[in-house]
């Protein structure tokens, strides 16, 4: 994964700049804000949808070592080699998690799919299901809810119990990304298999998943 880092240091030891990441033919920009002390710096990386990551940088042997975390979990590590021009972009191939799998940090978090329906008889309702993609590659059930309303009755319910997520968790699967494809890595009878699941596209807090086998599309929105 290619990345470019541009930094600016003020007299008050305040650090600003941006990190541009190139992945799957897309360019994603993160705004940097932080503080420096001696040869180290720490602060936040903010994506354009508002998602905030934390970083720690250390200058060593004319190179910057960087760790990026989300929810106190390190999701990326990389080294940036210094280019001999003041405040110039610097390039690296960022290392993945210790399991060797890259995970697009833009996918980390809770995602919710919402469906609504209505009928000619005056009934209407809706349902929502949520999934949580964790930074370590695991997945959790984000819960579900539904409601129905009509001329003389109404009701709602909430809970969990997503069977598909339960099966994935039971298999010990981990998600990761390659290009714009979301994969599952599963271990069956001691054999590791990488299974392509969906093509993904993210824009302004919306995630479109397209099943690689059936072509079915699912639209999710990022929640808190």
Image (tube, grey):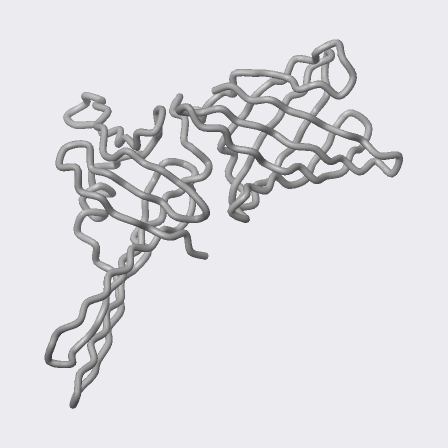
Residue 123 image offset from top left, x and y in percent: 16, 78
- Count of picture labels: 0
Q: Quadrant of residue 217?
A: top left
Residue 216 image offset from top left, x and y in percent: 17, 42
Which residue, as the protein is rendered here, is positioned at the far front?
Answer: 120
Which residue, as the protein is rendered here, is positioned at the far left?
Answer: 121
* Side (left or right) of 39 relative to 1: right
* Side (left or right) of 117 relative to 136: left
Residue 65 image offset from top left, x and y in percent: 64, 21
Image quadrant occupied by the C terminus: bottom left
Residue 94 image offset from top left, x and y in percent: 52, 20
15 relative to 77, above or below: below
163 relative to 20, above or below: below
112 relative to 123, above or below: above
**Residue at the image point whose x is 32% and y is 34% from the top:** 175
**Residue at the image point whose x is 49% and y is 20% from the top:** 95
* Side (left or right) of 40 relative to 178: right
**Residue at the image point whose x is 32% and y is 49% from the top:** 140
**Residue at the image point whose x is 52% and y is 41% from the top:** 70
Judging depth in this view, the residue of 10 and 102 nearest the camera is: 10
Q: Quadrant of residue 138?
A: top left
Which residue, as the protein is rendered here, is positioned at the far top?
Answer: 84
Which residue, as the protein is rendered here, is positioned at the far right?
Answer: 11
Q: Quadrant of residue 148?
A: bottom left
């Amino acid at each position: 994964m290619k990345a470019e880092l541009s930094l600016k240091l003020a007299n008050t030891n305040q650090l600003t700049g941006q990190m541009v990441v190139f992945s799957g033919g897309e360019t994603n920009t993160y705004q940097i804000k932080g503080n420096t002390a001696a040869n180290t710096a720490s602060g936040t990386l903010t994506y354009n949808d508002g998602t905030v990551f934390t970083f720690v940088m250390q200058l060593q042997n004319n190179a910057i070592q960087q760790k990026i975390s989300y929810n106190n979990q390190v999701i990326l590590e990389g080294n940036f080699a210094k280019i001999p021009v003041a405040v110039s972009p610097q390039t690296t191939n960022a290392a993945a998690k210790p399991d060797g799998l890259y995970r697009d940090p833009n996918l980390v978090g809770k995602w919710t799919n919402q469906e609504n329906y209505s009928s000619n008889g005056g009934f209407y309702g809706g349902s929502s299901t949520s999934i949580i993609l964790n930074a370590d590659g695991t997945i959790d059930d984000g819960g579900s809810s539904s409601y129905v309303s009509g001329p003389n009755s109404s009701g709602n319910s909430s809970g969990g119990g997503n069977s598909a997520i339960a099966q994935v968790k039971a298999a010990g699967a981990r998600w990761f990304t390659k290009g714009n494809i979301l994969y599952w890595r599963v271990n069956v009878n001691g054999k590791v298999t990488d299974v392509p699941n969906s093509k993904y596209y993210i824009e302004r807090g919306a995630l479109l998943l397209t099943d690689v086998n059936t072509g079915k599309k699912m639209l999710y929105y990022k929640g808190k």
